[in-house]
Amino acid sequence: MALEVILSPIKRFKMMMMFFNFAYGVAWLIVTALTCAFLTLLFDWVTPLPAVMRLILSVLSFGLIIFVFVRLIVAPVFKRLSDDTVALAIESKYPELESALISSIQLVRYNENEGFFNSDELVKLTLEKTAQKVQKMHFRGVVDIFRPLKVWLLAALFMFASAIYISNYNDVAVLWFKRFFTPFSAPSWPKYYNLKIAEHPKVIAKGDNLEISVLSTGRRHPAVVTIYSKSENQDYWESSPMQCYGGTKFTKKFENVVEPLMFYVEGGDARAPEEGYVRVDVRTRPFIKQISFWIHPPKYTRLPDTPKDKPIERSAISVIENSEIEFEVTTSQPIRSAELMNVTNIAGDNSFVGDEIINGNKLRGRLKAIKSVSFYFKLVDKEGFDNFTNHKPETYTLNVSSDALPDIKFEAPGRSLRMSEKGILPMRIRVKDDFGLKDVKLIHYNQKEQEKHIKTEPKTIAFKEESYKEQREVVLEYSFDIEKETGAKPGEEVVYYLQAADFCETHTKPAESSYFRITIVTTEELENDYTRMITRMRESLLDILKKQILVRDSVHALGEEITSKKKQPNEEVKSELRTLESDQRDITGKLRLCEESVHNVLEGMQMNRIGTKESLEYLDDVKKRLETLAATLSPEAARKLNELRENLAAASLETRFADVTLTQDEIIAKIKEIVERATKWATVAEFVGRLRRIIQDVEKLGKEMSKAVTKPK
């Protein structure tokens, strides 16, 4: 057992030493091979070697690699280590063994020799003591394991550097491999300067930009690369430096190329191409030479279609909504495909019915106009050139006007009114439509004044079709009998409006006018209202009279001062006349308001059938007198004041001032007459109203007395 303990580490040490020697040899083999490769690449790159020299270097490199392989890998594997050698190595690292390991090996050998006398007890004791010491030994104490690790680190560093170099300069590595492994058939190294023109289009569209890129692939890179270019019709070459990127890439951009371009580049001692030049041809983009439109409006508009022999040839066309547009496009060259594009990119705005390419350079199709839009045609010719890549094609505009709903205007009365249940409202309605009316009807419904939120069932009054059918503008007149049409009583309201429809299919609802209300009141209430309106009008006339007298007096006084030379016709006088003219025009406006008030009262009495014929004629006379004042006399006075102010330097100022004063005296006299007649009318109306109320009270009292007499006891 002690013998096995002693021999076991010796055998293990033999195996481990053989493995470490092998690993050590492999590391040195890698370092040697990569060093030879690097040195041969460096020598051949700096000074390109002839084929014979490369062959000699290759043979020497392979010889060195084989030597290292045999010396450091093969020899240690086949060289057998003796137990004594291992024991001596162990003894040198562990002096505390005191040659016990070597003595034990020798005693075992002597013990196996029958001719040699020994003591078994001595051998056994020696082996046991040696085994105790050997158990404490470790391989790291005998062999230096860091020695091969250092070489492997160096080999790993060489392999990492080689991998990086090959990944970045793969073409150089491949070329070195060919030059040293096939020295008599390998290509040469590139020149010091070598330029390569990158891929570029051989044909471009007219007006496009062309960018040329040049790569420097030589062993050295030029600081400046110059490009020489000329067009087809140019007699000389133009030179320009190219822009450098990263030292190895050079670019030049030619803008708006309209003719075939020839070029070549130079940098250092290199030229690309080595002979001749590179040519880039130019092709014209397909474009629209002519476009024709034929418009087919909707049938209900009764608008004529565009004649076949007279198409619209504009870039902007205006059509009515839902029109169909037929177009024909003539292109500059045969096209392979065409597509109509919506510039606004709103889906569903217009529908493109279809297209048809005829004879290669004609395109036909139809559009249905829904909304205004801008569009263009994407054209691709048979060579693959288009009119939209890096280019803005011609844009066409389609202006679509929608068919507006009918326009409704109540010319009379045009406002909400208070009327009696016996009243008749004369209506005058103007209805317009762009292309003709389809239906017109008057709609009304009753509504209690206290329950305005409750809407009753509406009633419809249809007009005769021959009065409006397919007409673009009509004036409809209708007498609305409140009692007959509505049966409304005092305290209720009648709401009415007009509906008008046209033939447009896209209109889902007819047009509606504003809603007007007729508030039903008693005749007495209306009479009181009219009396109050006339009374207020009379009070306004009295104010106007005072103001007119004041203006007349001011004009008269100013005229006397100028006539007597107390004042000179200067800017101050002009300012006073301007103020008097403004006051006179203000009087004219107020007279118009008074005339309007009388007109409303007269109109209301006629609609509600209130008053006698004589009272209506009397009120009509007041209205005409006010109309004469507001439309003729008062504006004439203002005009004369204006002329007087503008021509103060003219002669006969006294006569002209007197003329203005005379006109204003006439106005004052007529206002007094109107005030007197209005006073009489209001007094009579008030008297009649009181008399009617007395009669009503007497009738009411008589009914109550009759009920009291007939009441049973």
Image (cartoon, rainbow, N blue to C red):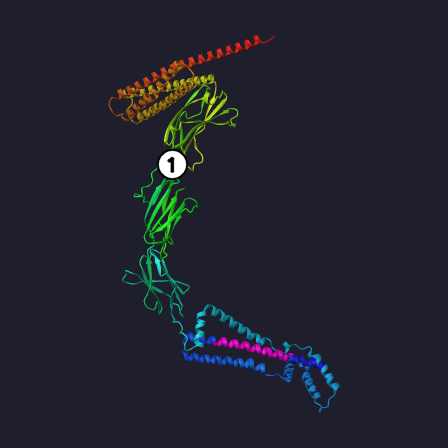
Q: Nearer the viewer, residue 43 or 418?
A: 418
Q: Nearer the viewer, residue 642 or 633?
A: 633
For the point 50% across and 22% down, which residue is it?
A: 492
Q: Is residue 499 above or below residue 69?
A: above
Q: Is residue 480 left or right of residue 713?
A: left
Q: Is residue 624 left or right of residue 650?
A: right
For the point 40% across and 38% down, which residue is it?
A: 402
Q: Is residue 335 visible?
A: yes
Q: Nearer the viewer, residue 620 or 17?
A: 620
Q: Which x, y percent locates residue 519?
A: 47, 23
Extent of the magenta region: 12-36
Question: Dividing the picture into quarters, in which one does residue 78 lie?
Answer: bottom right
Mark 1 residue type: Tyr
Q: Is residue 588 left or right of residue 565?
A: right
Q: Is residue 549 visible?
A: no
| Image quarter (top left, top right, bottom left or bottom right) of the N terminus | bottom right
| Image quarter (top left, top right, bottom left or bottom right) of the C terminus | top right
Question: Dividing the picture into quarters, in which one does residue 237 lie?
Answer: bottom left
Q: Nearer the viewer, residue 115 or 702?
A: 702
Q: Is residue 454 above or below residue 80?
A: above
Q: Is residue 113 left or right of residue 167?
A: right
Q: Which x, y percent locates residue 435?
A: 37, 34
Judge whether residue 32 is colored magenta. yes
Q: Which x, y percent locates residue 133?
A: 70, 79
Judge whether residue 645 is colored magenta. no
Residue at the limit of the structure toward the left, as seen here: 651
The residue that mark 1 highlights is 300
Q: Which x, y percent locates residue 512?
A: 44, 31
| Main secondary structure of the magenta stretch | helix
Task: Determine crowd level at label 1: few under 14, some 14-19, many 20+ residues with C-alpha closer than 10 A.
Answer: few
